[in-house]
Image (cartoon, rainbow, N blue to C red):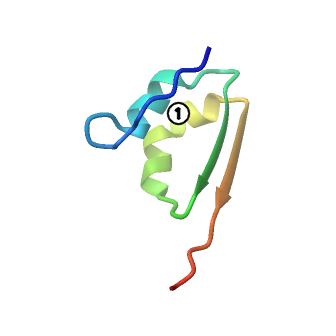
Amino acid sequence: MIIMEVINNIDKTLGADLEKTLGKNSRLSIAAAYFSIYAYEALKDELDQIAELRFILALLRPF
């Protein structure tokens, strides 16, 4: 059973949650408007172990 949680990056951070939950057979899909090489580096050890990573980088359009 999947339980949804609110991650506000103040009380609970996405990076800390991913470090705790990613495992060898994990598959991760991310859609984001921004990409931080620093965030990737912080999670590199965990991301190198997962089975699949899909990343969609969305373009921001000016108003």
Q: Residue reaching furthest top?
A: 1
Taking the spot 62% from the left edge, 14% from the top edge, the residue there is 1
Give left or right: position of 51 versus 35: right
Q: Quickly name the residue at label 1.
A: 45
Residue 8: horizontal and vertical position, in percent? 34, 42
Taking the spot 59% from the left edge, 20% from the top edge, the residue there is 2
Give left or right: position of 19 versus 59: left
The local crowd at label 1, few if under 14, some if 14 to 19, many if 20 or more residues have their Cα within 10 Å, is few
Taking the spot 39% from the left edge, 38% from the top edge, the residue there is 7
Give the amino acid type for the residue marked by disc 1 in the picture.
Asp
Q: Residue 15: which quarter of the image? A: top left
Q: Residue 17: which quarter of the image? A: top left
Residue 22: horizontal and vertical position, in percent? 56, 26
Q: Nearer the viewer, residue 33 or 23?
A: 33
- Please tell me whether mark 1 sits on a helix, a strand or a loop: helix
Give left or right: position of 17 versus 60: left
Q: Residue reaching furthest left?
A: 11
Q: Is residue 16 above or below residue 60?
A: above
Give left or right: position of 32 versus 10: right
Tag count: 1
Residue 54: horizontal and vertical position, in percent? 71, 46
Taking the spot 32% from the left edge, 34% from the top edge, the residue there is 12
Q: Is residue 62 above or below residue 60?
A: below
Residue 37: horizontal and vertical position, in percent? 48, 57
Q: Residue 6: which quarter of the image? A: top left
Q: Is residue 10 above or below residue 57?
A: above
Q: Is residue 3 above or below residue 18?
A: above
